Amino acid sequence: MFIGHKLKKLRRENLDLREQCKSQKSRLANLEAEVSAYEQKIECSTTHVAPLVRMIEKLCADSRYAEWDNHPAAMILVQQTRAYFDTIMFQGLKIPESTGLEEKPDREVQNVSLVNPVPDQKIVESRRKTEAWQKVYGRSYTDIGKLPFPPMQADDFDSGKFVEFSSDEYKSMIIGVKASESERIVIDPGIDAICTEPWGYERLTEDKRGLSRVMHDYWGKWDNMEYKFYWPFCLTTVGKAGNHSIAVACLYHESILACGETNMYADTYMDYRKSEIFHRVTSDGVYWFKDEKPYCMASNRQKAAIWMILHTIMGAEYPIKYKGIQLNENE
């Protein structure tokens, strides 16, 4: 009996030690995360986001630029936004392999997989990682395509670390309407910020709307192409079709010849300047804040910097213009 009692006691002590070890590991992981966040915060405050924002604040407070059609702060916004989208322009390209085409799965195997689909372990793991990512870094607001809006908080979030920011509240802070015809501007490929993708190697090099246009010094806008310009982002997006053509135009800084025009204009101009989100959502490059309280972490400092430039411009006391159009007010 004595031996059995001692054995039970040792097992309980071992269990207690395991729980303590697990708890200590959890605390260590949390401390490491906090240290990492502080390190990032220090880096952002000294090298990237904060210094850039301070420059924008000074420019927006300097009345010497009040009458300029292209305010320096607006030009920095365009430069930063263009740099952001230029980095993603050629991501995910489909490059043809020199080894030839990949072998297709056997038809019988295809039929079996369609009749009795089995979840792929890689797909399941990918979804799990995506959900875990969104709990920390939020998720994209898909209703507005690729505009650099801040992320939206995931439905399941860490309430001990982040303040709640529901999807309904987020969406209620965004107001988009069609801009007036008077705010139609010339868009300069290779200078203005344009969100586009060339799709793939063949589209870029072999398609008649791709690089072959360079040889003939001509670009033309075909029926399915659609350009949308968004105020106050000063960003053009390419929808439906024509990504390969506009990518070439961006590379070579060439005008688009459409309907007899010698300049490129968007088909639709959207206006989000009255959106409350510009004033209530901020970032320090480490966290995204709603009313100065963190609701998720920032995954991209450049996007955070762009947002803080917008936030500063929208709060300026005098008109901040781009190509003669005021960004920070829409009367």
Image (cartoon, rainbow, N blue to C red):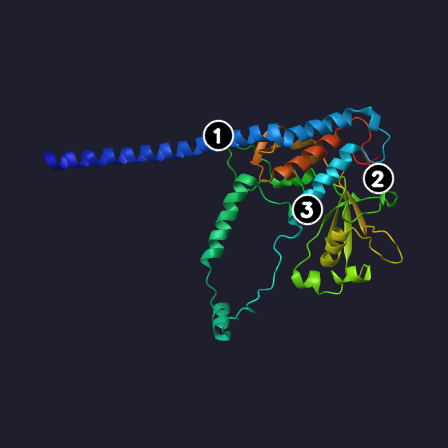
CA gap between label 3 and label 2 equals 20 Å
Q: Nearer the viewer, residue 186 or 182?
A: 186
User: What is the quadrant of residue 93 in the picture?
Assistant: bottom right
CA gap between label 2 and label 1 equals 44 Å
Residue at the spot x=47%, y=54% of the render?
124
Type of amino acid at the residue the image marks with label 3: Phe
How would you rate the neighbour count of disc 3 (Cα within 10 Å): few for under 14, some for 14-19, many for 20 or more? many
Q: Kindly tell me whether residue 183 is visible in this rendering.
A: yes
**Callout 2 touching callout 1 (CB < 8 Å):** no
How would you rate the neighbour count of disc 2 (Cα within 10 Å): few for under 14, some for 14-19, many for 20 or more? some
How would you rate the neighbour count of disc 1 (Cα within 10 Å): few for under 14, some for 14-19, many for 20 or more? few
Residue at the spot x=58%, y=31% of the render?
294
Q: Earlier in the sequence, mark 1 or mark 3?
A: 1
Q: Which residue is mark 3?
A: 85
* Residue 174 in the figure: left or right of residue 68: left
Q: Which mark is residue 323?
A: 2
* Residue 45 in the figure: left or right of residue 23: right
Total marks placed: 3
Residue at the spot x=24%, y=33% of the render?
13
Q: Looking at the image, which residue sits at the far right?
A: 260
CA gap between label 1 and label 3 equals 31 Å
* Residue 123 in the figure: left or right of residue 57: left
Q: Kindly tell me whether residue 156 is visible in this rendering.
A: no
* Image x and y of residue 57, in percent: 73, 27
Type of amino acid at the residue the image marks with label 2: Lys
Q: Which residue is mark 1?
A: 35
Q: Nearer the viewer, residue 63 or 118?
A: 63
Type of amino acid at the residue the image marks with label 1: Val
Q: Earlier in the sequence, mark 3 or mark 2?
A: 3
Q: Please determine whether, in this image, residue 152 is positioned above or below residue 294.
A: below
Q: Please determine whether, in this image, residue 284 is positioned above or below residue 263.
A: above
Q: Earlier in the sequence, mark 2 or mark 1?
A: 1
